[in-house]
Amino acid sequence: MSYEGNIQWFPGHMTKTRRMIEADLKQVDAVVEIVDARIPESSRNPVINELVGSKPRIILLNKCDYADDSATEKWKRHYQKQGYAVLCCDCRSGKGIKGFVPLLKKELSELLEKRRAKGMIGRMLRIMVLGIPNVGKSSFINRMANSRKTTVGDRPGVTRGKQWVTIDKEVELLDMPGILWSKFEDREAAEKLAFTGAVKDEVLDAEALADSLGEFIKIHYPDRLIERYKLKGLDGRTCELIARARGMMMAGGEPDTERAAAALLDEYRSGKLGKITLEEP
């Protein structure tokens, strides 16, 4: 991938969020870390490892309806080998979500046993929900609570502040704000985050980004482009090929590559190009 645009966060509240997490970790029994199944590693903030330490953790591979099933299975095994409990799910459709509470109770069975032995019946399991913006934290909590208690949005960084949500007579979740990087070290991870919409589009060169995504899909999932856009071949700039195939032309017969770029990014993000994963373990 060769996108050369400039991708940056503007993380004024990063330090505040970090302090909030450190303080609240003392009150919780485990952490749920939500990642995007299309880019599991790129959508993990390394700061979370540092903060959470050895506290029990479940990794939720969310948006699995949009990810390549075989790649998701590899990621699941990869994280299980590292000692994490893993759940593959799609919080928008609800797929896999029913498995969360049983997995959590299995993961915390020793703690529950100790509490029973001490007669601490009815004490809630308190779970912190962490992840970068736009990985689906609010959708997950709404699904678990069967309500719209939190603000859900496709725009990065819609959840503000923190809130406790009861999801079961024994479990409550602490929804935290998305935790951002203070700066990007890894350009490729930044680019993948941009592909999935985790970075605000306003700060990007959408055409260069779409062409770079197109190059990846040409190599790994060429049939998806050919079928979706009825392309005769894959030689040339992706945005130009799409513009011509869809009749997106400007005055003077020039292909409207800006419109084509917007279409490609939107159709990738909404799953219309099929299940595509951008990285493997």
Image: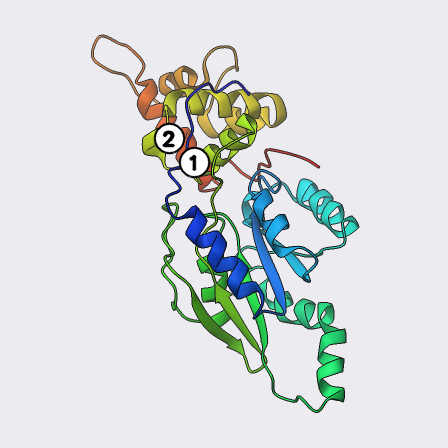
Q: Secondary structure at mark 1?
A: helix
* Residue 37 found in image quarter: top right
> Which quadrant does the N terminus fall into?
top right
**Label 1 close to label 2 by CB (< 8 Å):** yes
Name the residue tied to disc 2: 263
Image position, residue 116 (x, y; %): 72, 87
* Residue 276 found in image quarter: top right
Q: Secondary structure at mark 2?
A: helix
Label 2 Cα neighbours within 10 Å, binned few <14 / some 14-19 / many ≥20: some
Image position, residue 148 (x, y; %): 38, 67
Q: How is the image coloured?
A: rainbow
Residue in view at x 45 percent, y 65 percent? 142
Is there any visible trace of residue 67 in the rendered image?
Answer: yes
Residue at the extreme top: 252
Name the one closer to the observer, 56 or 231: 56
Depicted 45 relative to depicted 268: above or below: below
In the rendered view, does 27 fall on the left or right side of 113?
Answer: left
Residue in view at x 58 percent, y 39 percent? 39
Residue at the extreme bottom: 119
Depicted 166 relative to depicted 136: above or below: below
> Which quadrant does the C terminus fall into?
top right
What kind of residue is marked 2? Answer: Ala
Circle on res. 267: 1
Is there any visible trace of residue 92 in the rendered image?
Answer: no
Image position, residue 99 (x, y; %): 64, 66
Residue in view at x 49 percent, y 40 percent? 181
Name the one closer to the observer, 213 or 107: 107
In the rendered view, does 256 fall on the left or right side of 64?
Answer: left
What kind of residue is marked 1? Answer: Glu
In the rendered view, does 258 fall on the left or right side of 7?
Answer: left
